Amino acid sequence: MSVFHRLHAQIGTLATARIFFIGGAMKSGTTWLQLLLNAHPEIACKGEGHIANHLAPLLAQSVDRHNQKIAHKNKDVFNEIDGFPLYDRDDLAYLIGAALLLPFASATANKNLRAIGEKTPDNIRHFDLLRTIFPNARFLQVIRDGRDCAVSAWFHNLRATPEWTLSTYPALSDYAAVFAQEWATDIAQAQAFAASCPAACLTVRYESVLYDTAGVLRGILEFLGLDAATDIIAQCCEAARFERLSDGRARGTEDTASFFRSGTSGNWRAHLDEAANRAFIAAASPWLEVLGYV
């Protein structure tokens, strides 16, 4: 069997699974949720593919440029006969969908797969596009107190890109002021999407996962139509336990050199002074109030 036929058959099989997407503001807990779900025997949940926010625009641009070239050739060279067909929007949607599923073809061989999830935080800004391509997909919006997100993102950036971070933002308070506006915009967009298709979208609160991991996970699995047996939930919780992910460090013991820095709620109080807190609330209004964070 050729590579094309083998992969085409695998993609066809994968497309019959429940497709879902995880999105949320930066450092809102999307990775933790991904790891919890990927530990389920029927789920392959990977991240970050950056399909909607990065690859899809590149594919659209490439298809558009290619269409222009072919249309020019059809008109100027082959105007007396039928030219080569152009790609349309449905073709582009297929290419994007195939690009999403292809990486799972080799990553799911050892699972009795019933669901495929892709976690990219920026998905939260592209749920509409993803639903156009996968109209039966489910969407998980992770929310967390924006101030905790900002502090966690600040330390993440200091760890990953320290030169850029410190040259762009002199202090955490400067970064938090900008982050607050982006957080509020993301929340507003995601809430509008959820209101437009409530049956397809579930909001997952980080703080709830923190204090009742098993209970929240059970609700997510039921939302996805998957096995929510107690032993499976326990297996998932153990696989994504903070102490395991942080190589034995207790939750709340901060390590700024780790991706899993603290794993707590309310840590912003140790890093944002009252002036920075007030500025954040003003910039992120009204969503902090709507979501019950102030």
Image (cartoon, grey):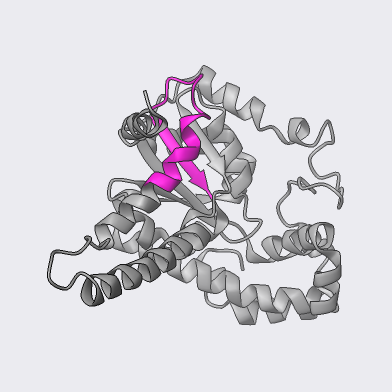
Question: In front here: 20 or 184?
Answer: 20
Q: In this view, does 76 lie above or below 59?
A: below
Residue located at (54% from left, 54% from top)? 50
Q: What stretch is highlighted in magenta?
A: 98-119
Residue 147: give x, y in percent of width and height.
Answer: 69, 66
Residue 16: give x, y in percent of width and height.
Answer: 30, 33
Residue 239: give x, y in percent of width and height.
Answer: 65, 27
Residue located at (83% from left, 65% from top)? 271
Residue located at (58% from left, 23% from top)? 234
Q: Could you tell me how many numbered marks the image carries?
A: 0
Residue located at (43% from left, 36% from top)? 116
Image quarter where the C terminus lies is: bottom right
Q: Does the magenta stretch include residue 198?
A: no
Q: Is residue 223 left or right of residue 103?
A: left
Question: In front here: 147 or 248?
Answer: 248
Does any portion of residue 201 appear in the rendered image?
A: no
Q: Is residue 106 magenta?
A: yes
Q: Is residue 144 left or right of residue 264?
A: left
